[in-house]
Image (cartoon, coloured by chain):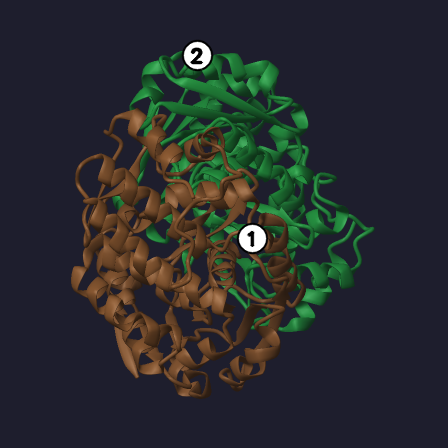
Chain colours: A green, B brown
Amino acid sequence: MITLTVDLAERSYPIFIGQDLLQQPGLVAPFVKGTQVMIVTNSTVAPLYLDRAKALFTDLQVDAVVLPDGEEYKNLEILNRIFDQLIGGHFDRKSTLVALGGGVIGDMTGFAAAAYQRGVPFIQIPTTLLSQVDSSVGGKTGVNHPQGKNMIGAFHQPQAVVIDTLTLNTLEDRQLSAGLAEVIKYGLIRDLAFFEWLEQNLEGLMARDHALLAQAIERSCQNKADIVAADETEQGQRALLNLGHTFGHAIEAGMGYGAWLHGEAISAGMMQAAYMSQLLGDLSAADVERIGAIFKRAKLPIYPPNELSNEQFMHYMAGDKKVQAGKVRLVLLKSIGQAYISGDYPAELLQKTLTEWRS
Amino acid sequence: MITLTVDLAERSYPIFIGQDLLQQPGLVAPFVKGTQVMIVTNSTVAPLYLDRAKALFTDLQVDAVVLPDGEEYKNLEILNRIFDQLIGGHFDRKSTLVALGGGVIGDMTGFAAAAYQRGVPFIQIPTTLLSQVDSSVGGKTGVNHPQGKNMIGAFHQPQAVVIDTLTLNTLEDRQLSAGLAEVIKYGLIRDLAFFEWLEQNLEGLMARDHALLAQAIERSCQNKADIVAADETEQGQRALLNLGHTFGHAIEAGMGYGAWLHGEAISAGMMQAAYMSQLLGDLSAADVERIGAIFKRAKLPIYPPNELSNEQFMHYMAGDKKVQAGKVRLVLLKSIGQAYISGDYPAELLQKTLTEWRS
């Protein structure tokens, strides 16, 4: 088992990574404060792992709420079901919430924990590659608004994160690919050596080699933990984690949440950012091709949906959180392994990117 | 003008108290960070003060959302209207929210500010006595759940609080009385001298003498600020502020939010706590009578509604946030001016209180 620590002073917490951690009750027990545990999961994950997750918490009142599965349910209305069950079961302010599932479950459970009685602790048990390498680190929680992703939320750090790589055995191929999009992102924004390692090991990861998966998860979480420790509430460099996300969020919102997986949308979005970086003279055409090659090997889309017009892109991008005072700030690449954030680019290059980077 | 400071390290903020502060733009200008201001108010306050509030923010994009007036609208669904308008207007993460209204508006605006894009700043302009002496200090924000008050929320401190006592001129008598319930509470829990001052000046306050009102507001805010500074997230002595609230919340929830005003409910609730303190041998019958006398002069109810049975009381009290591990913790009085919190009392005395303290 690998243990990483996300270093946030009194809000620091461990991430445990390994095989079969869902069979080790001793891991999570020290992180439960009160006597009541509410597991939040969805209808896909519950039949697979809920019993095992419940068995982690012995001698406690353990209840579960099973939400419908999908990004389209990540909203205030479905969030309220968690509150209904907590209040109906008289869960007190020392209750612990447990997120068992992917990023949607993690974000919603985290926000429910942030808001229930103005804040209770929570534990993350991410079961998708995407959530293991992304939403399990950093404390961002929230729900979507029909007009914008993650517009309503809180920063709320978990007590601990338990990543059992065995849960990836039951993950759909499409979801595994979507997770790899975020993994590749860490290479692109700040870790060229990791990008090269991924180029060498991509097929092994796609074949679910557990040793390789654990390495990729560790390196991804370490990259994210380093960034988050330096910038907990996203005032500066943390924004680099949003490479491809401004474009990607427009794709997700424009196509209707759930149509494109988050990882698919940011894969196309990272290609748009890469192409724009080429137009700005920072990347070569060969760089862009090299980035596209690894996404293609990961069976990820490299072009945005043609149904989405430039105008629709601009509409959704203008509503993105990274806008400050009306200006769309974008994460772009100086080189593979080095990202930067800028609102200071010729507006026509963004238009040119939207027009030209099409299938 | 009086200026108090709520001392919370980097989250410290000033409270300005005085006549006609809504005509002084210089007061609030330093507390706006970005270029966009969203004023949240309700349909009662908007015709009276919205224009004046807007005029406070010059050279900025100022918009307003007008919610229906009443505690029954303090829920997630109505909260979402604030998010709709923020997102629809492309308000960015440096936007400032302004709460213009009573406690419901303050709590909802504060929670919207805590959750919008995971946190934006806000300014409070409380226009009721209750909100001026209570919800404007302490950073508690949130909405109700059908089964429990303030069950969903956040701790989020304002940038500044502006209390213009002239707004009390338009306040209904019943609302003024409800505010006095919280004012009297500060005397009861920790400030005997203030309780005695209130006994001497109650009729002047009821007649809206502005000098007396400013003094009462200052002393109330100072008491609350002292408690909050010592215990920002309610781990300890801050719970004393809940004198009468466990009983009172049961009254509000049991009668349907909005039927009894919060101040009315906690007035009856404080009397129940006082009577129980008498049963415990700490207060004399004369003390209980003395407390009842000041509430009666303030035209506040001293008995709970007879429609609410003991069983209903216990049901709603068991759902209260102050329950830990199934035990109803209550704030009780050692003497007038000295409260304490306890879950360690004979259960039958609570039953006896519910049965005997009836009109």
Where disc 1 sits, the SS reads loop
Q: Is the same chain shared between marks 2 and 1? A: no
Q: Nearer the viewer, residue B272 or B56?
A: B272
Question: Is B116 placed above or below A26 here?
Answer: below
Horizontal side of residue B104 vs A237, given as left or right: right
Please name the residue shown 19% across and 44% down the image.
Answer: B283
Q: Position of residue B146 (x, y in %)?
A: 57, 41
Q: Amino acid at mark 2?
A: Ala
Question: Mark 1 belongs to which subunit?
Answer: B
Q: Nearer the viewer, residue A242 or B296?
A: B296
- The alpha-carbon separation of the residues under discs 2 and 1 comes to 43 Å
> Disc 2 or disc 1, which is closer to the eye?
1
Mark 2: few/some/many CA within 10 Å (<14, 14-19, 20+): some
Question: Is B149 placed above or below B101 here?
Answer: above
Q: Position of residue A46 (x, y in %)?
A: 59, 19
Where disc 2 sits, the SS reads helix
Question: Mark 2 belongs to which subunit?
Answer: A
Q: Position of residue A221 (x, y in %)?
A: 42, 36
Question: Is A132 placed above or below B135 here?
Answer: above
Horizontal side of residue A153 vs B138, given as left or right: right
Please name the residue shown 39% across and 16% down the image.
Answer: A57
The answer to which image quadrant residue B323 occupies is: top left
Horizontal side of residue A46 vs A231, given as left or right: right
Instruction: Give the quarter of the figure containing the C terminus of chain B.
Output: top left
Mark 1: few/some/many CA within 10 Å (<14, 14-19, 20+): some
Q: Amino acid at mark 1?
A: Gly
Q: Nearer the viewer, residue A170 or B236?
A: B236
> What residue sits right under mark 2 in the picture?
A55
> What residue sits right under mark 1 in the picture?
B258
